[in-house]
Amino acid sequence: MGAVFGLIFSVNKYELEITSKGKPSEVVKYWDSIEFVDPASSVVVKSFKSEDQLKILNYFQNLSKELKEKLVIVVHTKKPSEVGKQETRYFEKVQKIEKVKTIPLYIKPIGTIFIRLLMFIAIPLVLSSLIVGASSLGDLKKVGRIGLKMLLFYCITIAIAITIGLFLTNTIEPGKRLSDDAKEKLMVEFAPNVQARIQETVELNVINTIVNIVPTNPIYALANSEMLQIVFFALIVGITLTAIRKEKSEPVIKFFDGFSDLMIKMVDYIMKLAPYGVFALIAATISEFGFDILQTLFWYAATLLIGLIIQQFFVLGAFVKVFARMNPLKFFRGIREVMLIAFSSSSSAATLPVNIESCELNLGVPKNITSFVLPLGATINMNGTSMYQAVAAVFIAQVYGLELHISEQLIILLTALLASIGTAPVPGVGIIMLIIVLRSVNIPEEGIALILGIDRFLDMCRTVVNVSGDAAVATIVAKSEGVLEKR
């Protein structure tokens, strides 16, 4: 329903809302051309045609504040009532140019509030449940055994996902199906956004990532949602509680146990908003995104979506069947709410509270396993994101006519695997990690402009695979420990 609503009230690509200083916003429609003019010299600095809505928005966004107020925007429009006549409008001291909002964009805040509520309880839930879970595991040997199983399955599923992505991209060759015209258009429209992404990228350093797991200030880690640091702190607290006298540790464990139950109950209340929040988010995304860009990048999107479907239903389904002895249909039914929230939010962190609740109530995974495995999985287990990085890297190389040999594709596999450890569980961060993968095999980073327009939709899809992988591994670990309850 959200998708249909978004399509009906889609954003018009031939309309813009222009706001000048001290004046109400004005809407311009179906322009023939829009010019940015220097009033001092009457020179046209930049000119755009009727199909260039996105280029206009990108150009204006990248102007300095001084230039925005200095340049005069001249809009040439043919009057519908007078064929052949042209109307010229002038806008001075322009502060804002944006797409004209439709109903889905006005209701989007409902979805945003829903996601913020889930994010709001994610950190307290992780901290409290992980402290209780670690303290109930008893000893370091058990923690280490569960940790090794978890990491082993995470690494195996990620490696399989990347391999599937590389195989499909080399077989389908989506980069060789993109026309030169489409390539040029995508580069012009999205290149300005890529430069900012490149500048905020950091180099992949596994040693630093490991060192940074240990927080210098746990309060700072909690305030800034540093998930791995929070997990480390909670684990240390939980394990240490087992080493002190019971009369001292019991009140602390009871407090965090009660606090964890409180957070889970809060999830129940927040999930009553799910139908409305998901509807608003999907409607807004479809309304703004549309299907034009999807048609241009059909083969790239199809390659990645085929890979995600194989990973989701065949690989993870087989793992659950073989290692957890659970019917895959039962597994996917049990996490259907998790997949829906992941798709609409594009955030593993926002989905984490729902994932913990679903695994415990629907799949029979005990709290000490979910609280240990799922928070770590939300940070380091990125099946979908890793596959996306492999597919995108090879796609961009194919567009540029670069031949990637087996050694370079193995480097992509290894780099994408390591990069997933440092991928934050929030929307859009996969693009930043992709730059690291591209650099590892000397593929032009500017090529990200080719895929940026469709990234939001594919981010929604790959997040579903990310969180499903977390739930699958939690179920497998619980079965291996003999604690998986029948549901």
Image (cartoon, rainbow, N blue to C red):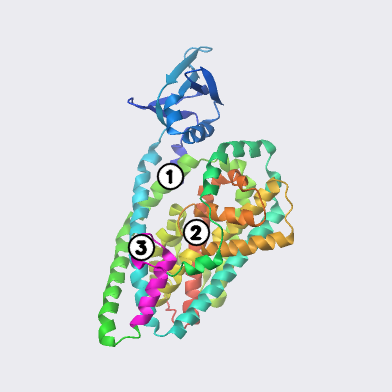
Instruction: Identify residue for label 1.
Output: 283
Magenta span has 146? no
Q: Main secondary structure of the magenta part?
A: helix
- Point out residue 203 in the picture as x, y percentages from the top left corner: 56, 57
Q: Secondary structure at mark 2?
A: helix
Camera-nearest residue between 439 and 338: 439
Q: Which residues are magenta?
A: 215-241
Nearer the viewer's eye, disc 2 or disc 1? 2
Q: Secondary structure at mark 3?
A: helix
Quadrant of res 340: bottom left
For residue 220, which numbered disc appears in the image? Answer: 3
Helix, strand or loop for disc 1: helix
Pointer 2 or 3: first along the chain: 3
**What whole-number distance in Å separates the C-alpha atoms at marks 2 and 3?**
30 Å
Residue 159 position, x and y percent, is 61, 67
Q: Spatial distance from mark 3 to mark 1, Cα to Cα?
A: 36 Å
Pointer 2 residue: 464
* Three-letter code, disc 3: Tyr
